[in-house]
Amino acid sequence: MPKVIVYSRVPEDVLACLKETFEVTYYEKLTDDNYSEFMKELTEAEGVLGSGLKVDRELLEKAPKLSVVCNTTVGYDNLVLNDLNEFGVLATNTPEVLDDTVADTMMSLILATRRRIVELDYLVKSGDWKASVTPDLFGYDVHHKKLGIIGMGRVGQTLAKRAAAGFDMEILYHNRSRNQWAEDTYGATYCSLEELLNESDIVCLLTPLTKETRDLMGKEQFSLMKKDAVFVNGSRGQTVDEEALFHALENGEIYAAGLDVFREEPVPADHPLLKLKNVVSLPHIGSATLETRNKMAKLAADNLVATLTGKDPLTPINPEVRS
């Protein structure tokens, strides 16, 4: 039986299915205590499955039998594809199964920031709600506003569906290329990043992390936004200059921010952004529902089984390795 390593928590039924086909070494999480053992096991492994492991030349040189790396996420900035291609190692991810769930999370952050939900929840629970709420605690509407989506991929399209059909929002988007389907289906308008930032009431960042998108949102970009606009990040923390975002929020250059991701995760408790009332912060839970995480693990497992039994994986990242 081929030897594989599962290095992140997966549902019991998924793990049981893998054990029917493979010799499985299982770690719920890689830690300082078990990492040396993991690296020893890696020398014999033909496949690995999990989330977040940095796979580059240094690791691949220590895994001579490795054939496939299966991410249990849609993002794969942990994988150095040039190195994987050079070593002939296939990589897979888990797109599509999480689109609705992540879009729900983004819509939640939009509503929470525009309507000050978290701040007003605290007002009630702290006992400070003494009289009718005065205008200084009012938020802003979401319906019939302009939503600017940076990155009109699958999640962006799914968010556009919710915004256009459910909230009668006007959709602006910026992308590497035009998305005719989004334009035809949701009336989305393609525009430059500068135009999107100038005109949007809500800006939602949904790009993958690449050399081009690293620090995409900085001081200049936040200065272009409306003072009553909110910024939502469902991309990666490294796409945003957090110091610039802090100053934009603290100085009233933008109204609020909803963040599911940070440059350092878990984010330090003393991070300046966490001290601001106009920031809604989440612990990178965009796809974190039981149903969706189970589907992601199942898809990753299916990719692993297919690859190591001579079949084509369902969602390869670098299929050219097998061509």
Image (spheres, helix red, strand yellow):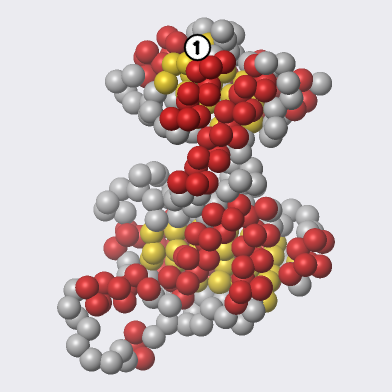
Image position, residue 191 (x, y; %): 74, 67
Classify residue 183 by image quadrant. bottom right
Residue at 42%, 21% in the rendered image: 26
Residue at 64%, 79% in the rendered image: 168
Image position, residue 278 (x, y; %): 37, 70
Q: Quadrant of the N terminus?
A: top right
Which residue position is annotated with label 1? 23
Classify residue 138 by image quadrant. bottom left
Neighbours of disc 1 within 10 Å: few (<14), some (14-19), many (20+)? some
User: Quick one: 127 or 295, which is closer to the camera?
Assistant: 295
How many numbered discs, if any?
1
Relative to 162, does residue 39 appear above or below in the rendering? above
Relative to 171, does residue 106 appear above or below in the rendering? above
Residue at 31%, 76% in the rendered image: 120
Horizontal side of residue 258 vs 45, given as left or right: left
Residue at 32%, 59% in the rendered image: 274
Considering the numbered disc 1 on the image, is that residue within a helix, a strand or a loop?
strand
User: Quick one: 185 or 57, which is closer to the camera?
Assistant: 185
Image position, residue 193 (x, y; %): 67, 64
Relative to 236, does residue 179 appear above or below in the rendering? below
Q: Quadrant of the C terminus?
A: top right
Horizontal side of residue 182 vs 298, given as left or right: right
Relative to 281, does residue 116 appear above or below in the rendering? below
